[in-house]
Image (spheres, rainbow, N blue to C red):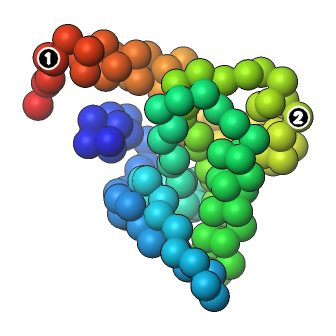
Amino acid sequence: MNKLQHFLLELGKGFAFVARQQRISTETQDFYIDLVFYNYVLKCFVLIDLKTGHLSHQDIGQMDMYVRLYDDLRRGEGDNPTVGILLCGSKDRSVARYSVLHESQQLFASKYRLVLPSEEELRQELDRETQAARTGVTEE
């Protein structure tokens, strides 16, 4: 998580670090978002949830809830809708294609792609960190 946080801040495209493991709550439950950034170019929060295993429809539903809850609780006047990014070890394209977030991705794709890291950039960074973890080699 430290490496991912550092990677996003190095991108230099308007990311400001907000929190790590940020708690958001409903009436009866607490939830923790892995990483929260604010992008001052896009004027929106960017929530990142890291899943080491296979992407599931539960993960997608969880991120959808985080985005909606975050918009209700934290989004300020003049802020654009919150963006949620799920980073996972692997995915089933059909699960991603038929998910709730698929439609949201289409709505914001042209606006957000210019500033957010590409899927390929995120994949390469995750691959580097996975390989480093396997070999025990870390960079600071």
- Count of picture labels: 2
Q: Residue at x 84, y 47 (%)?
A: 100
Residue 116 picture location, percent across and down: 55, 38
Which of the two residues, 46 or 67, is positioned nearer the viewer here?
67
User: On the rendered structure, is 3 left or right of 37?
Assistant: left
First of labels 2, 1 by sequence position: 2
Would you place residue 38 above or below residue 139 in this image?
Answer: below
User: On the rendered structure, is 26 left or right of 97?
Assistant: left
Q: Quadrant of residue 62 in the image?
A: bottom right
Which quarter of the image is occupied by the C terminus?
Answer: top left
Q: Which residue is drawn at 53% across and 29% down?
A: 53
Residue 132 visible in the snapshot? yes
Q: Is mark 2 on a helix, strand or loop?
A: loop
Q: Name the residue under label 1.
A: 137
Q: Mark 2 points at which residue?
A: 98
Q: What element carries label 1?
A: loop
Residue 56 picture location, percent across and down: 69, 36
| Residue 127 numbered tag | none
Residue 121 visible in the snapshot? no
Residue type beneath disc 1: Val
User: On the rendered structure, is 5 left or right of 137?
Assistant: right
Crowdedness near tag 1: few (<14), some (14–19) or many (≥20) residues, C-alpha within 10 Å:
few
Which of the two residues, 76 or 83, is positioned nearer the viewer here?
83
User: On the rendered structure, is 17 left or right of 47?
Assistant: left
Crowdedness near tag 2: few (<14), some (14–19) or many (≥20) residues, C-alpha within 10 Å:
few
Callouts 2 and 1 close, C-beta under 8 Å = no
Q: Quadrant of residue 134 in the image?
A: top left
Residue type beneath disc 2: Tyr
> How far apart are labels 2 and 1 at the CA level?
38 Å
Would you place residue 103 above or below residue 25 in this image?
Answer: above
Q: Residue at x 32, y 42 (%)?
A: 1
